[in-house]
Image: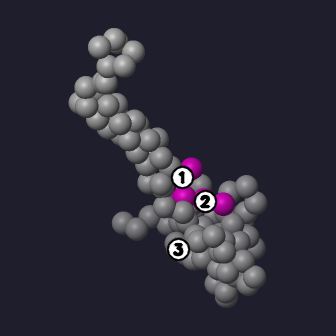
Amino acid sequence: MSTATRLRPPFRTTIGLALAAATVALLTGACSTQQATCGGDEYPVRSVGAPGNACVSNDEEPPKGYARYPEGKVPQHEGDTWSTYWSTRTLDENGRTIELPDEN
């Protein structure tokens, strides 16, 4: 039997497939671990004068007591830069960013 017609041992193929599957799982898993702040048809809003946020349908205005985040400072995923930033800040009634008081 020549080397061109010889079959590969099954364990080599199995190992190759397992490694390929593990690589794909690692590469795609990193993207899905971040939870989006809001659903696809919603945008996040910030509570005015207090901690907290909510999600509002794209075709609606923020409810009373909530305001849109300032442009360029909108959190997209939990734990991202802007989510962390807003964990210690909120908006006042004029839309200015203010520090939240300590909870001590």
Residue 51 location in percent, x, y?
52, 72
Q: Quadrant of residue 5?
A: top left
* Residues at discs 1 and 2 in contact (Cβ within 8 Å): yes
User: Which one is nearer the viewer's eye here, 100 or 82?
Assistant: 82
| Residue named by callout 1 | 80
Q: Nearer the viewer, residue 20 or 12?
A: 12
Could you tell me which residue is drawn at 67 percent across and 88 percent down? Answer: 64
From the image, tell me which residue sits under label 3.
Answer: 52
The earlier-in-sequence mark between 2 and 3 is: 3
Residue at the spot of label 2:
75
What's the distance in space between the residues labelled 2 and 3, CA to CA?
13 Å
Mark 1 residue type: Asp
Q: In this view, does 65 lie to the left or right of 1?
A: right
Main SS class of the magenta portion in the image:
loop
Tell me the quarter of the image containing the N terminus.
top left
Q: What element carries label 3?
A: loop
Residue 31 in sight from this viewpoint = yes
Amino acid type at circle 2 is Pro
Q: Which amino acid type is shown beneath numbered disc 3?
A: Gly
Which residues make up the magenta segment? Answer: 74-81
